[in-house]
Image (spheres, rainbow, N blue to C red):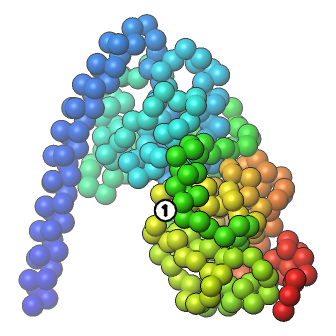
Amino acid sequence: MAYWSRQRALWTHRYNKYTHIVGKYWSFVWKYLELRQLKSKLGDKPLVAIILSEQMGDIIACEPVAREVRQRHPDAHILWVVRQQYAELVKYHPDLDGFFVEKCPSERVLLLRTGIFDQVYNMHISHRKCKYCPEDPINPTADQINLTFDNYYDRGDLLYMFSQAAGLPALTAEPKMYIPEEVRQRVAALQLQESPIVIHCQSSHIMRDWPVESWNRLVKWLLDTYPYPVIEVGLQSIITEAHPNFRSLCGQLSLLETAEVIRQSHLFIGIDSGPAHMANATGATSILLLGQLFDFVDYLPYSGRYKRGEDVTILNNFGHPCAELPYAWVQDAVLQRLGQPKFV
C-alpha cells in the first residue's frame, strides 16, 4: 500500500511539473508577442520593467520604487512585473502604465533574455527558483553588492535593500497604498462598526506567528475592557470568541479591501506580515509583534513612519521567536496606546 502511495505521489509530481513547464513556454511565447506588439505601438517611447513579483509585504514596502522610476523615466511606459495574486497591489498606482503578470520566475528569465525591455529594475535576490523549472534567476546587481537570502535582513529594511538590488539609490520614502473609490464603497457596504481594533494573527510562515491561545486571550480582554469593536482579517480565522462586538472577515476580503479596513482602524495589532505593511502604508496606528526569524534577531522590515517609530509600538523579545513574546507585553502596549479602560 505504501509503495502505491509513493508511486502516485511521484507521478502526480511529474504530471504537475511537466504540465507547468509546457504551460510556461506557451505563456512565454504569448507574452513576448504581446510585448512586441506593445513596443510597436510605443514607437520611440522606452518600455521599462520594475520586477518584484512577490511577496505581499515586499511589494507594499517597495511601492516608492515606482515613484522613483517614474522620476527617472518621465516619458517611459512603465510596467510592474508581478504574480497574479498580488496584481491588485500595483494595479492603481498613478506612476505605472500597467502591470505584467508572470507565471513563474523561469518565465521571467526567458523574457529578460529576449531584451524586450529597454530598462529593467529587478528587485529580486538571485536564486529564487521555480520549484518545477531548471532556470536559476540571477540578479547581477544584487550579487555585486553581496545581497543574499542569508544576509538581507541584516542590511536594512525591505525598501532600503531591494531598491539597491534594482540598481537604485537606497530609498527611505514612505510607502503608500492606492485604494480606489470602488473598493472603499465595497468596504462601506459591509457596514462595519466605527473605530475598530483590527487584528491579523497568522502569517505565511509559522516562525512569525504568536500563539492562538494568546490571541484569543487578548481578544477576550479587549472586548471585556474597551468599547471598540474587534475585527479579524487574514485568510483563516483563529479567534473563537463569540461576542457582538467581534467580527471575522477572514477569507472574505480582497487585498485592497483588507487595506481599507486597516486604514479605518483605531488600532491595528498584528504580526510581521503583509497586513502590517498595509498598516504602515495607510497611516494606521499599530502594535506589531516580532521575533527571531531564522538567524535574524534584530531586524525591522518597515521604512517610513514605522522605521522612525511613529504611530507604532514594535514588540520584540530579542533572541526569541514571536511565539515566545510575553502576553503581558502586548497587553501593556495596548494600555499605553488606548489608555486606561473606559469601562470594566
| Mark 1: secondary structure | loop
Q: Nearer the viewer, residue 197 or 342?
A: 342
Q: Is residue 107 left or right of residue 238?
A: left
The residue at 55%/14% (across/down) is 75
Q: Is residue 247 above or below residue 97?
A: below
The residue at 58%/58% (across/down) is 188
Q: Is residue 210 above or below residue 145?
A: below
| Percent x, y of residue 62 | 61, 43
User: How many numbered discs?
Assistant: 1
Q: Residues within 10 Å of mark 1 (few under 14, many from 20)?
A: some
Q: Is residue 67 left or right of residue 330?
A: left
Q: Is residue 45 visible?
A: yes
Q: Quadrant of residue 169?
A: top right
| Percent x, y of residue 233 | 56, 69
Residue that numbered label 1 is attached to:
253
Q: Is residue 299 above or below residue 62?
A: below
The residue at 43%/35% (across/down) is 99
